[in-house]
Amino acid sequence: MSGVGKGIAASSVGTLLQAKGFDVNLAKVDPYLNVDAGTMNPTEHGEVFVLNSGLETDQDMGNYERFLNRDLRHEDYITSGMVYKHVIDKERNLGFGGKCVEAVPHIRDEIVERYEKASKLNKSEISIIEVGGTVGDYQNIMFIEAARVLKINHPADVIFIMVSYLPVPSSLGEMKTRPTQNAVNQLSGYGVHTDIIIARSIAPLDKKRKEKIGIACNIPEENVISAPDIDSVYDVPVNFEKDRLTDILLKSLNLEKRKGPGLGAWKKFVGAIKNTEKEVNIAIVGKYFSTGDFILTDSYVSVLEAIKYSAYAEKVKPIIHTVNSRDFEMEKSDYSVLRKFDGIVVPGGFGEKGIEGKLNVIRYARENGIPFFGLCYGMQLMTIEFARNVLGLTGAHTAEIDPQAPYLIIDIMPDQKKKMLEKDYGGSMRLGLYSASIKKGTVAYEAYKSRTIKERHRHRYEVNPKYIEKIEKGGLVFSGKSPDGTLMEIAELPRAEHPFFLGTQFHPEFLARPLRPHPLFTEFIKSAKKRGQR
């Protein structure tokens, strides 16, 4: 089922094999017909993660990068939309020489080619390909068919791992294996034989269940890996090793064991999570939280994880609170609840809903000395708030919300205006890795300790050059700019005026890693930690 942990399982397998000294690559298949993840609502599909190349992807790509501690390529992400679009465009250009183009073999073979291309370009010894969705989904049958053909092409070189959920109905109190047996049987009907089963459940599997699954699914008992619910996803690789998953993988792939770097650094990070007692309270003020009667934090997963990495590095436990910005849109809103937070983050987003609430929260953080970190839209809004309430530019706004505002502090980038008129929304923003120059003597320079940085972007709007001089004279410092000085990348207040009031036009959370926390998040956490120790 969706959300069972396939992405974390794939990431953990990659981490284990990398620890043994193998060059590993991870690729994600999303069966939807969107060409990429860029146009999807975060509350429906979770966070959109951006690669260095600018490709907008599923949030699992973020998990892959964080677990492997390296950047992934454009080719490591595949959607049905990409595949069908490529094949149809090729047909329109007579690329098939007048043949009748069909799902089999043309779509299937295109998928196989993409699987192999990702491995070849990364020069990986082992490629891990995650097929999204659920066994039985109509959408992913073609990707499973492509995997079957891959096995035929490389009979001694391909194995199949299935992640399956074993329910424990509360009325029975017994773990049930039948859904897993049925899923394996259905995969067999597609011509795919399951080699390893990662069995997710609320509790560890006992020997009896492993035996039962092994016999019913025609695999050795030891190839059933227990994956119980745990406190942290970063425990998963360590947990898998209890069932000797790495040895089973290498045996299944006919590979000799190696002496790699090991899991020492990873275990040290996991230990920091468990052994941290001092707390720091961080508020994430956003609007992509509600999904029916439930709270969805996946919309901001990279932000949440970036906060954790820096907090653990600073030996504090982050207590993260989700705050709906719409609760602060009224004049009589109770802002005193914000006082309990040691730091406030306003992450990226789009559209008008909840914006006035975010602006009010930013003003409160600025005026009351609460460490504040604005990401992308959050940086744009802190600039607008400063213009309104410090510079007295009443009605200052962003062209995204009010194109007729008297002071367009944030305006659409010139090259984007034509795209918007033509309704060219997909993959057309400023996307991917760009360089920026950092001003010495600023909070940003204190964090990066470098004059030049590279960060990932995802936006259409920028600080309007028309107001930059006025804003800087008013006291807001643009400590990071594009190399040619035209685009404002980082805005901040000096330390003398505020402990930490900083925003970035880019998304630093996309480059935060468990073993390599992002310097700006770490600087933010340091300030929040000081506030918490008052």
Image (cartoon, rainbow, N blue to C red):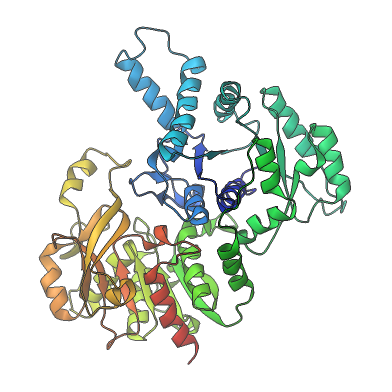
Who is closer to the viewer here, 121 or 105?
121
Residue at image coords 88%, 51%:
172
Quadrant of image for the N terminus? top right
Based on the displayed image, in which of its 4 quarters is residue 480 positioned?
bottom left
**Which residue is pictured at 45% across the width and 65% down the height?**
516
Asked if 12 appears above or below 102 in the picture, the reply is below
The residue sitting at 16% across, 80% down in the picture is 474
Residue farthest toward the bottom in the current orientation of the protein: 534
Q: How many marks?
A: 0
**Rendered image quadrant of residue 439:** bottom left
Residue at 13%, 68% in the rendered image: 467
Residue 238 lies, in percent from the top left, at 66, 58
Image location of residue 340, percent across then percent down: 50, 83
Please say if 103 is above or below 502: above
Question: x, y (%) of residue 11?
Answer: 56, 50
Residue 508 image point, x, y percent:
37, 62
When asked about the image quadrant of residue 87, the answer is top left
Please indicate whether residue 323 sits to the left or right of residue 50 in the image.
right
Q: Is residue 163 visible?
A: no
Q: Please state which of residues 7 and 458 is positioned toward the viewer in this rendering.
A: 7
Q: 176 or 234: nearer the eye?
A: 234
Task: Say if residue 170 shows up in the picture.
Answer: yes
Camera-side residue of 339 and 503: 503
